[in-house]
Image (cartoon, rainbow, N blue to C red):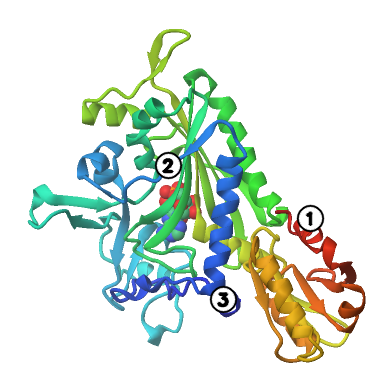
């Protein structure tokens, strides 16, 4: 599957990888389209389709003061243990699925190494990547790569409220890279050190937080369902009170049942007024909202849906994948929602003669104005359909002998494999309807 769509090549594994290996995160030509479509679907649902949310693109590098205020400098850490026997490192709170790094033990569970007394005492390991700004490397020049996009939204709260006509309830949304020096990256692109987040901070009057928390929990679950994810593979899990982050008074995770078990896709947290108050205190700049009707200043409460682009992409891929047994053969098919499919339409001439390639190229060029098209004339047409099924292309358009006679083409549907004829004059409308664009 990975090879087919080609997104992400992080080497998995439970033990810490050699420096640099997981920086090979890369999206191949189809993977980059898939991820872009996930981000576009999120932006469309969270920003364009709403009157109450605006977008932002804040800085990746931030001064330590920002991360001191948010609590990341002091508290954004995981417990790290070393195995004296195999020299691997583990996250102490993620031992259940971890495997010993010593090949001689042949996949032995890390918990056995722990029980055998091989582990060191846990040390708190801060996950932020540190760097320096400017030519002089001293403590005054320290900066951090953001471990989440959210803080960039909080520190720009006043900029947005001063420059846009927004008032609570309203949201600020952002998609961008975040960086965490994870102790155990792995499970393909589920956990990497460089990843993308889609986060929205929704600012509400304090007495309305419960209503909006319930609203966003339901909305965010529904987003995955609307994009075709199977409900039986999705669940909402409430955080126990001892699991809550220091800034939250309530939190749920949307989880997906991956082949490696139920795991978090997204968290929806009620962050109270913690962040705005913290940044106000540390920066000395007031971060209240002024309500010109009641003439009062107040700190809004915040509901935050925080999703991972890479995790959502992986879940959509896993969920869409099928090896379907047909009468005479097995076909591999990705049932991706049309809005997520990397290629929307494939155009084929039935054979490479009688003017069919020229006609097919003309259709390709015409469709390229508004969608992502793939042209293919090599091999039997059945083989070409299969190749498109494997990458999840919802519709194939085939030019054949009849096209020259009556200006019609064949439209072939990925999921049902049914074919029907459509006049070229109606093609764009038909495709737009089927692709839901
Ligand atoms: P986890 O418990 O899995 O480490 P988290 O609860 O720390 O995740 P958040 O801080 O809530 O994650 O981040 C919001 C979202 O960002 C997560 O739900 C996930 O989709 C994504 N995310 C977080 N860390 C990573 C990572 N290392 N690699 C890929 N995606 C990530």
Q: Looking at the image, which is closer to me, 437 or 219? A: 437
What's the residue at 36%, 82% (across, down)? 102
Residue 128: which disc?
none
Q: Give the number of the mark in front: 3 or 1.
A: 1
Point out the frontmost of discs 3 and 2: 2
Q: Where is residue 349 in the image (x, y as percent from the top left)?
A: 77, 83
Mark 3 or mark 1, which has the lower sequence index?
3
The span from disc 3 to disc 1 (Cα, nearest Å) is: 29 Å
Identify the residue at horizontal 45%, vertical 84% (top origin): 106
In this picture, is 81 found above or below 219? below
Q: Position of 118 compared to 161: left or right?
A: left
Q: Assign the N terminus to one quadrant of the image.
A: bottom right
Label 2 with label 1: CB-CB less than 8 Å:
no
Spatial CA distance of label 2 from label 1 is: 31 Å
Q: In the drawing, what numbered circle is on residue 433? A: 1
Residue 68 at x, y percent in the picture: 23, 40
Q: Picture coordinates of residue 167 (x, y %)?
A: 48, 23
Q: What element carries label 1?
A: helix
Residue at disc 3, secondary structure: helix
Other residues around mark 3 within 10 Å, as few (<14) / some (14–19) / many (≥20): some
Whether the residue carrying mark 3 lies under 8 Å from ligand 1 is answered with no
Q: Is residue 421 above or below residue 57?
A: below
Between discs 3 and 2, the one toward the N terminus: 3
Q: In this view, does 203 lie above or below 181?
A: above
Q: Does residue 321 appear in this view?
A: no
**Residue tagged by mark 3?**
2
**Front: mark 2 or 1:** 1
Q: Label 2: how many residues lie within 10 Å, few (<14), some (14-19) or many (20+)?
A: some
Q: Residue 56 carries which label?
A: 2
Screen quadrant of the C terminus: bottom right
Q: Say left or right for 108 vs 414.
A: left
């Amino acid at each position: 599957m990975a090879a087919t769509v080609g997104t992400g090549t992080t080497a998995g594994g439970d033990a810490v990888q050699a420096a640099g290996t997981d920086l090979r995160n890369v999206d191949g030509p189809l993977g980059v389209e898939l991820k872009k479509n996930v981000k576009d679907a999120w932006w469309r649902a969270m920003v364009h389709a709403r009157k109450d949310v605006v977008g932002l693109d804040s800085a990746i590098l931030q001064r330590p003061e920002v991360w001191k205020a948010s609590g990341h400098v002091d508290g954004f850490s995981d417990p790290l243990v070393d195995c004296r026997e195999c020299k691997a490192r583990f996250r102490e709170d993620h031992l259940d699925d971890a495997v010993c790094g010593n090949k001689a033990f042949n996949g032995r569970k890390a918990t056995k190494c722990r029980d055998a007394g091989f582990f060191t005492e846990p040390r708190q390991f801060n996950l932020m990547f540190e760097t320096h700004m400017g030519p002089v490397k001293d403590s005054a020049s320290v900066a951090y790569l953001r471990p989440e996009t959210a803080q960039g939204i909080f520190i720009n709260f006043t900029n947005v409220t001063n420059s846009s006509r927004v008032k609570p309830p309203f949201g600020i949304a952002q998609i961008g890279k975040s960086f965490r020096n994870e102790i155990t990256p792995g499970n393909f692109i589920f956990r990497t050190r460089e990843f993308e987040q889609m986060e929205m901070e929704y600012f509400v009057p304090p007495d309305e937080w419960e209503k909006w928390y319930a609203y966003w929990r339901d909305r965010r679950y529904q987003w995955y369902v609307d994009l075709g994810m199977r409900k039986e593979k999705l669940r909402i899990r409430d955080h126990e009170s001892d699991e809550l982050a220091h800034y939250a008074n309530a939190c749920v995770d949307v989880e997906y049942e991956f082949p490696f078990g139920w795991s978090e896709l997204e968290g929806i947290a009620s962050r109270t007024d913690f962040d705005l108050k913290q940044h106000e205190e540390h920066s000395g700049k007031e971060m209240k909202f002024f309500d010109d009707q009641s003439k009062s200043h107040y700190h809004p409460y915040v509901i935050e849906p925080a999703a991972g682009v890479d995790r959502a992409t992986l879940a959509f891929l896993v969920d869409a994948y099928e090896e379907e047994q047909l009468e005479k053969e097995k076909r591999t098919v990705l049932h991706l929602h049309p809005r997520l499919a990397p290629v929307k339409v494939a155009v084929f001439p039935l054979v490479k003669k009688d003017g069919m390639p020229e006609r097919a190229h003309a259709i390709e060029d015409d469709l390229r104005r508004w969608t992502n098209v793939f042209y293919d004339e090599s091999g039997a047409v059945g083989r070409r359909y299969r190749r498109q099924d494997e990458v999840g292309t919802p519709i194939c358009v085939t030019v054949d002998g009849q096209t020259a006679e009556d200006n019609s083409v064949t439209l072939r549907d990925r999921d049902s494999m049914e074919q029907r004829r459509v006049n070229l004059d109606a093609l764009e409308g038909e495709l737009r309807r089927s692709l839901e664009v």
